[in-house]
Image: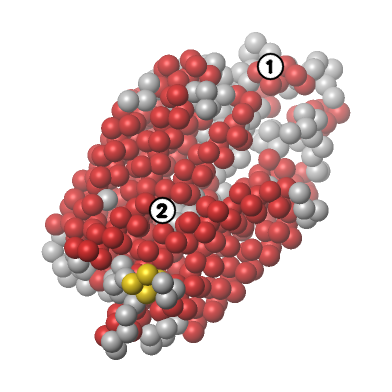
């Protein structure tokens, strides 16, 4: 690929999206097996994520208009890592902290994914969007590979769900570091797109 | 992509778009229920039951794993199959006579696999793993074809200037091991305020009547494609018939 900033962004996205997808995929298993929460609680949590997610995505969109999408995405990654860390600490059997966490996840989930898409849209040359977005979607799909694998390996060899969940923080760290190194202005200039006011 | 696209009349297009929205609504049910909430805990319980009976849990009889890590490994495997299958299915669909038939085959196969999960009980965790891998792979394959319908059913001139995110009300979080639903929760990039929307260069290739005037702006709707606002079509332009129709129906 001729555009290093787009490539760097894809690498960052691969990692932090991995963390996001894995947390979503395995949160129910974690809640059921480790925290001992009932299915009804888990269902309520998922619904909370959906509802808060809509509001969160819109709100974060507005915030990104002021602060710049990249900074908002980095902020959501910090929040994600925090959520995972708190999930590691939650005592078993208590539904309320889990539902609060679900609300936090909902808040950052829609925003981080939608803003990632729009960040990438700016780094992509005008006439090759389909080609570059296919890379984006491959990254999006393949993201669910490493996360569950790491989770499963940690679970098998260390025997603890909590530690396995904590291990996912590494994805957010790597993704966040890589994303902070993406030079958005340079990337947009490279492909010849128009520079927005805040990025 | 052909520069002159013939679009269906609005009623047909609206019907197609509705069908497209409903497919996303239906497919999201899979990823939220099976992918996110139910299969994980349930399959882990079944694997645990089998383990308690003294059986060694394995991944399809090959790799020994513990009961608890069976589901995460299963997710990894299903995504691996997805990643391999999706480009192949994309190529098949592009070169087939009916993309809808290809999508239908995978959608129904996935639905049948999920229906067969009815038989998961007791200790038949292997069946659960197999069905999940099949269902997830079919889900991904169908989504590839589903996404490719978008440029065909969504015209550049819709009333709001951007095709609204159809999947957002269905789910914004049910993107467990698939990438589709997350991609449908697209919003207008907030960093591109109306004043900064770039004027797409490809418009100049449409010839007279299709060029971007100095006052028209093309909003980028966050899904990587510029969409033309109705203001970009000026009445006095000598536009092609297709362009005129598009402007008239926006």
Find residue A79 and report its image quarter. Answer: top left
For the residues labelled 2 and 1, the Cα–Cα distance comes to 43 Å
Furthest-top residue in this view: B214
How far across and down, in percent of the image, does residue A188 sit? 47, 19
Query: Which image quarter is the N terminus of chain B in?
Result: top right
Q: Indicate the secondary structure of the residue bearing disc 2.
A: helix
Labels 2, 1: front one = 2
Q: Which residue bears the numbered disc 2?
A: A145
How far across and down, in percent of the image, does residue A113 sit? 42, 42
How far across and down, in percent of the image, does residue A74 sit? 30, 34
Q: Nearer the viewer, residue A182 or B218?
A: A182
Query: Would residue B161 be found to the left or right of residue B133 on screen?
Result: right
Q: Which residue does the image show at 32% across and 65% down from the upper left?
A: A28
Residue B173 against residue A191 in the figure, above or below: below
Query: Would residue B81 be found to the left or right of residue B230 on screen?
Result: left
**Chain for disc number 2:** A
Residue A65 against residue A107 in the figure, above or below: above
Q: Indicate the secondary structure of the residue bearing disc 1.
A: loop
């Amino acid at each position: 690929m001729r555009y290093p900033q787009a490539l760097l962004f894809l690498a960052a996205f691969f990692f932090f999206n991995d963390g996001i997808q894995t947390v979503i995929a395995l949160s129910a298993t974690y809640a059921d097996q480790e925290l001992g929460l009932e299915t009804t609680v888990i269902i309520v949590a998922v619904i909370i994520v959906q509802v808060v997610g809509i509001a969160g995505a819109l709100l974060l969109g507005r915030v990104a208009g002021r602060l710049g999408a990249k900074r908002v995405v980095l902020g959501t990654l910090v929040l994600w890592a925090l959520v995972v860390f708190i999930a590691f600490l939650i005592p078993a059997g208590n539904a309320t902290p889990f539902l609060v966490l679900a609300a936090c996840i909902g808040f950052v989930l829609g925003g981080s994914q939608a803003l990632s898409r729009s960040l990438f849209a700016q780094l992509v040359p005008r006439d090759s969007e389909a080609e570059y977005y296919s890379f984006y979607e491959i990254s999006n799909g393949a993201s669910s590979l490493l996360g569950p694998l790491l989770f499963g390996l940690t679970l098998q060899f260390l025997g603890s769900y909590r530690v396995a969940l904590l291990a996912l923080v590494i994805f957010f760290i790597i993704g966040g570091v890589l994303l902070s190194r993406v030079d958005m202005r340079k990337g947009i200039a490279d492909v010849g797109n128009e520079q927005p006011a805040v990025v | 992509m052909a520069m002159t696209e013939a679009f269906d009349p609005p009623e047909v297009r609206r019907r197609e778009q509705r069908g497209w929205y409903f497919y996303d609504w239906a497919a999201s049910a899979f990823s939220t229920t099976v992918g996110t909430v139910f299969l994980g805990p349930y399959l882990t319980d079944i694997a645990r039951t089998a383990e308690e009976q003294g059986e060694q849990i394995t991944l399809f009889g090959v790799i020994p794993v513990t009961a608890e890590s069976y589901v995460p490994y299963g997710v990894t495997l299903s995504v691996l199959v997805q990643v391999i299958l999706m480009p192949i299915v994309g190529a098949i669909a592009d070169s087939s006579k009916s993309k809808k038939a290809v999508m239908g085959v995978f959608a129904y196969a996935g639905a049948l696999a999920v229906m067969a999960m009815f038989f998961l009980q007791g200790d038949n965790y292997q069946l659960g793993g197999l069905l999940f891998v099949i269902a997830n792979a079919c889900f991904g394959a169908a989504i590839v074809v589903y996404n490719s319908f978008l440029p065909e059913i969504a015209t550049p001139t819709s009333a709001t200037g951007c095709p609204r995110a159809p999947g957002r009300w269905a789910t914004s979080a049910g993107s467990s091991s698939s990438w589709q639903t997350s991609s449908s929760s697209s919003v207008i990039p907030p960093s591109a305020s109306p004043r900064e929307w770039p004027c797409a260069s490809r418009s100049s290739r449409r010839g007279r009547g299709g060029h971007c005037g100095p006052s028209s702006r093309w909003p980028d709707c966050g899904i990587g494609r510029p969409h033309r606002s109705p203001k970009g079509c000026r009445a006095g332009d000598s536009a092609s018939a297709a362009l005129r129709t598009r402007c008239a129906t926006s």
